[in-house]
Image (cartoon, rainbow, N blue to C red):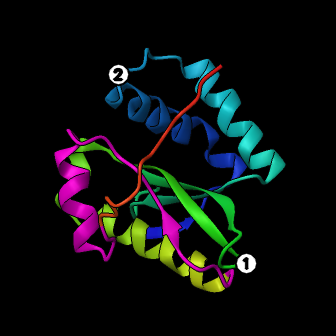
Amino acid sequence: MNIRPAEIADLKKLAKLFDHYRQFYRKSSDLDAATKFLSERLENGDSEIFVAEKDDKVLVGFVQLYPLFSSTRMKKMWLLNDLYVDPKARGQHVSVQLIERAKQLAHDSNACGMYLETEKTNKIGNNLYPKTGFDLYDSVNFYEWNT
Protein backbone atom coordinates (compact mmCIF):
# COMPACT_ATOMS: atom_id res chain seq x y z
CA MET A 1 0.00 0.00 0.00
CA ASN A 2 1.34 3.40 -0.99
CA ILE A 3 0.28 6.40 1.12
CA ARG A 4 1.02 9.58 -0.77
CA PRO A 5 -0.21 13.15 -1.26
CA ALA A 6 -3.23 13.46 -3.52
CA GLU A 7 -2.67 15.03 -6.91
CA ILE A 8 -5.06 16.72 -9.30
CA ALA A 9 -4.74 13.61 -11.51
CA ASP A 10 -6.42 11.64 -8.68
CA LEU A 11 -9.48 13.86 -8.68
CA LYS A 12 -11.94 11.51 -10.40
CA LYS A 13 -11.07 8.51 -8.22
CA LEU A 14 -10.78 10.60 -5.07
CA ALA A 15 -14.15 12.27 -5.66
CA LYS A 16 -15.84 8.85 -5.80
CA LEU A 17 -14.33 7.90 -2.44
CA PHE A 18 -15.27 11.31 -1.01
CA ASP A 19 -18.84 10.91 -2.23
CA HIS A 20 -19.05 7.51 -0.48
CA TYR A 21 -17.59 9.10 2.67
CA ARG A 22 -20.33 11.75 2.65
CA GLN A 23 -22.99 9.09 2.17
CA PHE A 24 -21.61 7.29 5.24
CA TYR A 25 -22.58 10.46 7.13
CA ARG A 26 -26.08 10.37 5.61
CA LYS A 27 -25.54 13.03 2.94
CA SER A 28 -27.03 12.65 -0.52
CA SER A 29 -24.71 11.53 -3.28
CA ASP A 30 -23.45 14.44 -5.36
CA LEU A 31 -20.40 13.44 -7.36
CA ASP A 32 -20.22 16.73 -9.28
CA ALA A 33 -20.18 18.78 -6.07
CA ALA A 34 -17.67 16.40 -4.48
CA THR A 35 -15.40 16.80 -7.50
CA LYS A 36 -15.70 20.59 -7.39
CA PHE A 37 -15.07 20.72 -3.63
CA LEU A 38 -11.95 18.55 -3.81
CA SER A 39 -10.68 20.35 -6.90
CA GLU A 40 -10.85 23.63 -4.99
CA ARG A 41 -9.01 22.14 -2.00
CA LEU A 42 -6.24 20.76 -4.21
CA GLU A 43 -5.91 23.87 -6.37
CA ASN A 44 -6.01 26.32 -3.44
CA GLY A 45 -3.77 24.21 -1.22
CA ASP A 46 -6.00 24.87 1.78
CA SER A 47 -6.05 21.25 2.94
CA GLU A 48 -3.68 18.31 2.94
CA ILE A 49 -5.06 15.14 1.37
CA PHE A 50 -3.28 11.81 1.43
CA VAL A 51 -4.51 8.80 -0.52
CA ALA A 52 -4.01 5.08 -0.03
CA GLU A 53 -3.14 3.51 -3.36
CA LYS A 54 -2.84 -0.20 -4.07
CA ASP A 55 -0.09 -1.54 -6.31
CA ASP A 56 -2.55 -1.60 -9.21
CA LYS A 57 -3.09 2.20 -8.82
CA VAL A 58 -6.56 1.79 -7.31
CA LEU A 59 -7.34 4.35 -4.60
CA VAL A 60 -8.89 2.66 -1.56
CA GLY A 61 -8.87 5.44 1.03
CA PHE A 62 -7.99 9.00 1.93
CA VAL A 63 -7.46 11.35 4.83
CA GLN A 64 -8.01 15.12 4.63
CA LEU A 65 -6.61 17.58 7.14
CA TYR A 66 -7.10 21.31 7.59
CA PRO A 67 -4.64 23.65 9.31
CA LEU A 68 -5.68 25.30 12.57
CA PHE A 69 -3.78 27.27 15.18
CA SER A 70 -3.73 26.96 18.94
CA SER A 71 -3.47 30.38 20.56
CA THR A 72 -2.64 28.98 23.97
CA ARG A 73 0.13 26.78 22.58
CA MET A 74 1.09 29.37 19.94
CA LYS A 75 1.54 26.63 17.36
CA LYS A 76 -0.11 25.13 14.33
CA MET A 77 -2.34 22.12 14.81
CA TRP A 78 -4.27 20.01 12.34
CA LEU A 79 -7.93 19.09 12.09
CA LEU A 80 -8.22 15.53 10.84
CA ASN A 81 -11.55 16.21 9.20
CA ASP A 82 -12.09 13.28 6.87
CA LEU A 83 -10.92 9.67 6.93
CA TYR A 84 -12.41 7.00 4.71
CA VAL A 85 -11.46 3.53 3.53
CA ASP A 86 -13.41 1.63 0.91
CA PRO A 87 -15.31 -1.21 2.65
CA LYS A 88 -13.55 -3.75 0.40
CA ALA A 89 -10.16 -2.60 1.77
CA ARG A 90 -11.10 -2.53 5.44
CA GLY A 91 -9.33 -4.87 7.81
CA GLN A 92 -6.02 -4.28 6.01
CA HIS A 93 -4.80 -1.47 8.32
CA VAL A 94 -5.28 1.17 5.62
CA SER A 95 -6.83 3.61 8.09
CA VAL A 96 -3.92 3.15 10.49
CA GLN A 97 -1.46 3.90 7.67
CA LEU A 98 -3.40 7.03 6.72
CA ILE A 99 -3.43 8.21 10.34
CA GLU A 100 0.30 7.56 10.65
CA ARG A 101 0.86 9.70 7.53
CA ALA A 102 -1.27 12.44 9.11
CA LYS A 103 0.87 12.24 12.26
CA GLN A 104 3.97 12.62 10.09
CA LEU A 105 2.47 15.80 8.63
CA ALA A 106 1.99 17.12 12.17
CA HIS A 107 5.60 16.35 13.02
CA ASP A 108 6.95 17.75 9.75
CA SER A 109 5.01 21.00 10.15
CA ASN A 110 6.08 21.42 13.80
CA ALA A 111 2.44 21.29 14.86
CA CYS A 112 1.41 20.67 18.45
CA GLY A 113 -0.98 17.89 17.45
CA MET A 114 -4.19 16.90 15.72
CA TYR A 115 -7.82 17.23 16.59
CA LEU A 116 -10.74 15.20 15.29
CA GLU A 117 -14.33 14.50 16.05
CA THR A 118 -16.62 11.68 15.08
CA GLU A 119 -20.14 10.65 15.87
CA LYS A 120 -20.70 8.58 18.98
CA THR A 121 -22.34 5.98 16.72
CA ASN A 122 -19.21 5.58 14.54
CA LYS A 123 -18.10 2.27 16.06
CA ILE A 124 -15.23 1.80 13.61
CA GLY A 125 -13.75 5.24 14.31
CA ASN A 126 -14.35 5.10 18.03
CA ASN A 127 -12.40 1.83 18.17
CA LEU A 128 -9.69 3.02 15.78
CA TYR A 129 -8.73 6.40 17.21
CA PRO A 130 -7.70 5.29 20.71
CA LYS A 131 -5.68 2.46 19.16
CA THR A 132 -3.74 5.00 17.10
CA GLY A 133 -2.87 7.22 20.06
CA PHE A 134 -5.78 9.66 20.20
CA ASP A 135 -7.20 10.49 23.61
CA LEU A 136 -10.91 11.01 24.10
CA TYR A 137 -11.19 14.51 25.47
CA ASP A 138 -14.55 14.76 27.16
CA SER A 139 -13.87 17.49 29.71
CA VAL A 140 -15.04 20.35 27.49
CA ASN A 141 -18.32 21.28 25.90
CA PHE A 142 -18.39 21.31 22.13
CA TYR A 143 -20.72 23.88 20.54
CA GLU A 144 -21.70 24.45 16.94
CA TRP A 145 -23.30 27.36 15.12
CA ASN A 146 -24.64 27.04 11.59
CA THR A 147 -25.81 29.60 9.07
Res 87 quadrant in image: top left
Q: Eyeballing the image, is 40 above or below 51?
A: above
Q: Position of residue 90 (x, y in %)?
A: 21, 53
Q: Mark 2 vs mark 1: which is more N-terminal?
A: 2
Q: Eyeballing the image, is 39 above or below 60?
A: above
Q: Position of residue 114 (x, y in %)?
A: 51, 68
Residue 27 circle label: none
- Pointer 2 and pointer 1: residues touching (CB < 8 Å)? no
Q: CA distance from mark 2 to mark 1?
A: 36 Å
Regarding residue 1, the answer to whether it shows in the image is no
Residue at x 67%, y 32% (from the top left corner): 37
User: Which amino acid does the dot numbered 2 rest on?
Assistant: Arg
Dot 2 falls on a residue whose secondary structure is loop
- Image depth: mark 2 or mark 1 in front: 1
Is residue 134 magenta-colored?
yes
Regarding residue 131, the answer to whether it shows in the image is yes
Q: Which residue is mark 1?
A: 74
User: Which amino acid does the dot numbered 1 rest on?
Assistant: Met
Res 96 quadrant in image: bottom left
Front-most of residues 16 and 67:
67
Is residue 120 magenta-colored?
yes
Dot 1 falls on a residue whose secondary structure is loop
Q: Position of residue 63 (x, y in %)?
A: 48, 55
Q: Which residue is mark 2?
A: 26
Magenta-colored span: 109-135
Location of the C terminus by quadrant is top right
Q: Eyeballing the image, is 44 above or below 70?
A: above
